[in-house]
Structures are given as structure tokens and as C-alpha cells.
Image: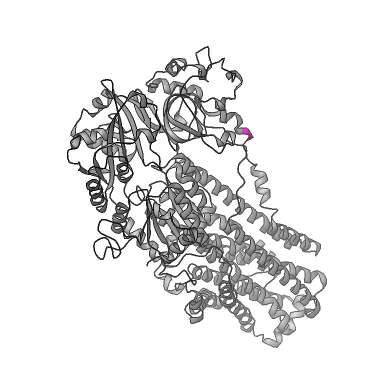
Amino acid sequence: MLLSASQPIWCLPAAAVPAALQTTPEGLGQGEAQRRFERFGPNRLPSLRRRSLLLRFVDQLVHFMALLLWVAGALAFAAGTPQLGWAIWAVVLINGLFSFWQDYQAERTLEALKRSLPRQVRLWRDGLPVQLSAELLVPGDRILLEEGDQVPADARLITAVELSLDLAVLTGESLPVARHADPIAAGEPGKAAVIPTRERANLVLAGTTVASGRAEAIVYATGAETEFGHVAHLTAATPRGVSTLEQQVGHIVRTITAIALAMGAITFSLSLLFVGMGPMESLVFAVGIIVANVPEGLLPTVTLALAINVQRMASQKALVRRLSAVETLGSVSVICSDKTGTLTCNRMAVEALWLPQAGPADETGLLAEACLCSNARLDRSGAAVRALGDPTETAMLLAAWARDPSIEALQRSQPRRRELPFDSHRRRMSVIVERDGALRLITKGAPLELLAHCSPQGRAEAIAANDDLAARGYRVIAVAQRCLDGSLLAAPADLLERELTLVGLIGLYDPPRPEVPEAIRQCHQAGIKVTMVTGDYGLSAQAIARQIGLLDPPAGNGGPSAAPGQADPVRVIQGDHLDRISDVQLRQLLKYRTRLVFARMAPEQKLRLVQAYRALGEVVAVTGDGVNDAPALRAADVGVAMGLEGTDVAREAADVVLLDDNFATIVTAVRYGRGVVANIRKFLPYVLASNVAEMTPFLAMVTFQIPAALTVLQILAVDLGTDLLPALGLGAEPPESGLMHQPPRRRTAALLDRPLMLRAYLVLGLAEAVIAMGGYLLTWRMHGLGWDDLRRAAPLLLHGQAGPVLTSIQHQASSVAFTCIVAGQIGAALACRSERRSALADLGRRPWLSNPLLLLGMAVEVGFTALLLGWPPLSGLFAMTPFDARLGPLVLLAPLVVMLADDLHKFSPKYLGTKKPAAGRGLGEGVG
């Protein structure tokens, strides 16, 4: 703490605070700020201690699947086959390493993305207002705080206007607490010397948030020296809940593992009872079957799919704060969007002015009055003059400055004596200014609410003018004033804001973003309902909604059921109407009307709307930027905050932060969210397909009394060498173009459903098994040995009694079967890139380089197979050898056969029937 006064900072009057903290009322100079930054360091808390990397790696080796494989390896050692045991344990270690690395990379990605959006703070440097990263704050900085800001450091208030703080992060209090700038006397009855710092009413503490009002303060402590920093070591990270995707992946793991155990038990029994194997040999085969069926690569692939899509979304200006939100985005069926800044460009400009007859001011005077009731400031630090503050206020200030460059002198000549900040219930802001000893109240805000407090004369004319401006899409601000008696200076708002005289109306236009109409069209095409939720007037909201395609153009004047000058009551629901209907009626309204605009909405009404949509089973994404939006953001399935204009409170409550505040970015994020689930469904059939080809040789051995086409080690080689990397490549597939032509996926829909299992086992897997067994039998035939010869050779090979000729033929035939399975897996990988498109047609159409990780995986498959066939140390261990070149065309044919089988299945009427949209949520829903 930097303090040169003998008294505590809270005991000093506000005017003495700058000197006590060795600064000036205008803030620090840049040079002094740099020196203090070098002395005190960045304004951030030390990182929390995390679980060590070694322990996090161990976690990947002791989960359910890993434990099963450890036991399987131990059984292999017990059965006298140490090579098999080491191979199984190698699978555990390699998959553990992949899982650990993917989790670690995903965590680092999220941290890096969060650092890319540093928290900003407004302060004064060299006497000028600037906006900097909160990490650059130093003791002595003068900062500005407004509603929704998170307090960036411990500071002493020097001015406070109706200020209240949310102290829940420090005290757990649920209600805001008032704050002021007055000193606390050292000898007051409360014994200030022993009052906890957090309870001193003229201090604002790091981590708390501004619930209402505005203030200026001088920083006295930063980083670890703040009150929050002193208790940070006691703060544990909030345990992360299990997402729907993680629950489903866990269910898949348990299901397939149960199948694997059952298959292993059946294998052991059949080989012992019918094949003539001994107990140890039977156990070895059973262990191999179990390992072959366990989806070892599932967990790292899921993590990779999430992490890659988080990075892709960040490149498209959508920062995901929680990995689980990516999957939820893919199920979004309703988007409740703000209007200003999200659907529009947030480039407010004054386009129209309206003055009442015999009003108190001309157009220049109207703008001047609006600027007196404003907290926007001109910034002359750059080459061009710009304004800082709320977009509506800055637009009016720049318009006033363009007409009268002396507007700042006018503001200084009428100093502010009191401010009544804007709030979402009053819908207006008021200030009391003084000129030549006389007091005036100036109020600006929503026209209808403000006109209700003006004299009735000319009110109808003003309302008609407001409706005319609003119908053109303008945001209309009314300005009124009254003279005050000094006795009313401290009166409450309801006594001050009455008997007002209307000065005029200001029409501001914020054009729709050019990309929003196409984004709205994509949402409707994807079965996603888009609902506009705004605090603006109904006619203004309706005009913008029609311009962006959210509402259809009017059939006549104002729509089929709207009176002239009124919004369409069927599609535009006003907040006061919402208050008059029950929750049941609201749910019926939302269920049967798909294109809606909610106008004049208060924060609690927005929350009620979100809850009603969720009660209907919808998955809701909600945008918000203010402190009052936080409850709705938390209640939604996906909260989306604005990164440019949003408050700190909104960003902390959200799952996704839009770095460009653009509605079209939400649609892009939904597309990537759908891509995550789609990629999991691409990976699953690929991994499961090879299990059929691995099981078939054993089933053929039991059924036809022929030698097994694959050894247990070869089965493990298929899993270890051919499944993992291509599966990761499928997890990294870019989203398909047709994803946004499908209805939203139900959150409860199973990832591993019947059509997927049938495709994996009976189409892809069966095709691989047929061609692998065909290659195996053909190799024996090419050596002049028929079916009967094969049956006679089986017991000799099984018990190690075969001569070198039979053994060599068996090794060649096994090598052909193995290579055909690997080639078939390449075809399966290409087929699994889409659930709907033809894999064969895509060969010449789809860009091969769009997924380099998949290409790398297939190259590794080929290289690994070549090593097994040609490198003696490996070929000897896995009982493989080079085979006759005449069988090469069969191997090359294997991927084509698998893709052809999958294409025939994809375009079969029965399969197409399973791909129809779920009832109640078809492609047309959300369009009407």
C-alpha cells in the first residue's frame, strides 16, 4: 500500500486522498505510472496451486477402462505370455499419455483464450481519460466505476453517485450495499479502527461489482496486496459439473466395456470347450478379445474434438469460457438476442430531432440539454475527436459538438450538483445542474415513461412523433427539464421527476449488421428459433426485426392485426402485456409462435422468458451485456456475453463471450458446437468397425475348425497402430456444410444409438471382415491348399506342431488378413467423415488437405503395417511376413469395398428413414 498520511485512508476527506496517495486529482502521469508499475508489479493475483502434472498423468492411468486393461495385462503375464502383457500395458500407457496431453493442451488453450480478452478499466493518465488493461493499474491511479463494472483494485472513493456494491465474493451478502465518499471518523461509536476493511463504506474492494450508480476512486492497493488477494489462497477452484456429453461418453464406455467382458467370457468358454485349447491358451485369446473391444482412444478423442473447436470458435471471435459449453451450443434450439450492438452495428448516430410547438429550446439547445444529462466525454488525445462512454450518449455528444464546438464550455458553466443514474425500471436518468445560482433538473430517457411525468399539453402530439420515428427504426430519446427550489436538492426521484417540460425528441439510428439477415436465415433453416428481447420501444424493435428478416414485412400498415402507429400485437409482445399473462399462457405463446419480438423488457422479465422456454424443453442461448442480464445468463443453457460493450458482471456469468458483439458469431458458434457431436459420431463407428474384423477369425476358428486368421498380438496391433491417430483425425474434422440444414439435436439423444451400431458392426465391420477372411483363405488357395487341408492344419498350428512350410503359409495368410483390415480401416475413416454424403463421390470432390491430422493418421497406419511386415524384430514378434505381390490388388480393393458398402447403406430407404428430423422439431419449425 502506498500511503503518506498519518491517518488511515478511510478517515481522510475525499479532497485529501490524492495527496495522501502521492498522486493528483487528475491522476498519475504516464512516467510515474510506469515507475510504480515496476515497483508494485502487475495488478493480478498469484496463480492458484494446481494438482501436479505427474498426479494428473496418473489420473489417466487409473480410470475404469485403464484399470480393466491393467488387469488384462496381468492375466496375460499369468498365462505365460509376457509379450502380450507388455503389449496391453503399452496400450494403457500410450492412451494415458494421449489423454493427458489432450487435457493439458485443452486447459492451456482455455487459459490463453481468456488472456486474449483482458479486463479493461477506465482511468486518467496525464489528465486525460483512457482505457487500459486492469493489469496495468498502480496505486495512485484515478479510476471510473459504473454499473456492471468489476472493481479492479482496492480504492478509496472520492465521488459516489447513488453507488451500491455487490460484496458477495467477499462477504456472501446477497443484497447490494450502499457506498459513499465521506470520511469515517476514527472516534465514531462503531470504532472504525476495528471495523473490517470490507465494511468501511468509503472503500471499494477488488473483486466486488458495481450493482448501481457510478463513482470515481483512487487506487491504494493492487494484486496480492488487495483485500481479495489476502484471502485468495483460501479460495479453491469451483468443481466443474459433469456435462451431458461427458455423461454420454461415460455411458458409451461402460456399455462397450460390458460387451467386451461378455465377449471375453464367451471366447474363453468356447475355446476351452469346443476348440480344444488349454485353460492358459483360452485365457490369452479371451484377454485379446477384451482388449480389442475396449475403446481406448475414446477419451482423448473427445477432449481433442472439444479443444480444437474451442480454438476454431476463438478464431471466429467467440471465446468459450467452459469446454462443456461447446457441446451444449450444438443442441441450442432457441436464441434470445439483444437488439442494440448484437443485431445492430452499435454505431449510434443522431438522425432526427423533433421539437414541440413553443418548446423551451431549438435543436442545438435540445442536444445541449441532452449532453448536460450525460456522462459521455470528448477525447482529444488522438488525431480525431471522439467520445467515450455509452454509445447513445456519445452519439448525442458528437452531434452537439458538431453543431456547437463550445459544448464543453457549456457543460463547465453548469456544474452538476446531483445525479440520479439510469435504471431499467425508471428508464430514465436525471441530473441537477446549477447556473447563476439557480437549479434545474434535466431528465432524458424513454419517451412514453418520461412523457407520463410531463405536463399533458402537447402529449398526444409528442407520442405521435415518437411513434413515427420509432416506426422508421429509430431509437427515440426524450429530454425534459424543470426549475427546482433548493429545498428539493436531496429529494427522492419520484418528487423530482414530475411536472416536467418536454424539450424535444432525439431520433438515433443504429443500422442492422449486414451479416445478420443471412445468420437469421441460417437459424430458421437449422430449426433454431430466434427471439429478439430488447428494452426499446415496440415500433423501433419491430422495424429492425423486419429489416433483418426476423419478422415478415407488413401486409398493410403495421401488419394484419395492428392499428396504425402500433406494433403488431401478434408478433411484438410488450413488457407490460407480459406481466398480465400467466406462466402457462406464456408457455403456450412461445410454443405456437415461432417468430417473436419482446420489447420494453425489464431484466426480471427476460429471466422469466428464459425459464419459460426451458420449461418447454428448449435449449436456450441468451445474450446479455449489463449487470441486470446476469440472472438470465446464468439461467440459460448457454449464456453469451458481449466482449466489446459488455460489463464485467455479464462476462463472468456467461459461458461464451463474443469478441465482436455480433449475432452472426453466435450462429457460427452453434455450428461448431454441432460439429463436436457430429465428430464423436464419426469416430465411434470407425473404432467399433475393426472389432468385427478382429472377432471374425476366432468365430471362424470355432465354427469351421480352421486356424485363426489373426493372433492376439496382431489384434492388439490393429488397435494400437491403426485406431488411435485416425480416430483423433476424425475428432478434428471441420464442421460439414450441411450441419445447419438439420434440426437441433435433442440434448437427451443418445450418441451411440441403434443406427450407428448397425452401421459400425453390420456394414463397415462386416465388409472389413469379409475381405480380410477372403484374403486369408485366398493365400492358402494360392499355395495349393484347400478347405480340407486347412482344417487338418488347424490343430497342428494351434499346438505348435506344424512344420516350417505350414507355419510360413500361416504367417503370410495372417499378414494378408491384417493388411486388409488396415486398408479397410482407411476406407472406414474416409466413409465416417460424413453420415450422409457418399464417401466414393467425396474422393474426387472433398479437399484432402482440409484435415491434415486424418491424413497423418492414415499415413501412420500404412507405415506401421510396413514395419510389421518388413522389419525383422517386429515381424518376428507379431508373426508376420511379406506376402505374394499378386495379393496387392486385393489390399488396394479393401478400402473401396468398405466405402461402397457404406454408400449402399447410406442411401438405403431404411437408413434414410432413420435420418428424418425428430418429431416436434422439424426443419420448418422456427420459420413460421
Q: Is residue 374 magenta?
A: no
Q: Position of residue 375 (x, y in %)?
A: 33, 32
Q: Position of residue 720 (x, y in %)?
A: 63, 62
Name the quadrant containing residue 250. Answer: bottom right
Name the quadrant containing residue 499. Answer: top left
Classify 368 as above or below 250.
Answer: above
Query: In the picture provided, is 626 more to the left or to the right than 829?
Result: left
| Residue 514 in sight from this viewpoint | no
Front residue of 184 and 844: 184
Q: Residue at x 45, y 29 (%)?
A: 136
Classify 789 as above or below 320.
Answer: below
| Residue 597 in sight from this viewpoint | yes
Question: Which residue is most to the front?
Answer: 456
Q: Quadrant of the C terminus?
A: bottom left
Query: In the picture provided, is 920 more to the left or to the right than 548?
Result: right
Q: Position of residue 783 (x, y in %)?
A: 64, 82
Q: Position of residue 546 (x, y in %)?
A: 29, 59
Question: Which residue is most to the right?
Answer: 279
Classify 193 as above or below 820.
Answer: above
Q: Residue at x 81, y 78 (%)?
A: 273
Q: Residue at x 45, y 41 (%)?
A: 627
Query: In the picture provided, is 94 more to the left or to the right than 927?
Result: right
Q: How many marks?
A: 0
Q: In terms of secondary structure, what is the magenta stretch mainly?
A: loop
Classify 491 as above or below 641.
Answer: above
Give, as a single range, the part of the protein colored magenta: 233-237
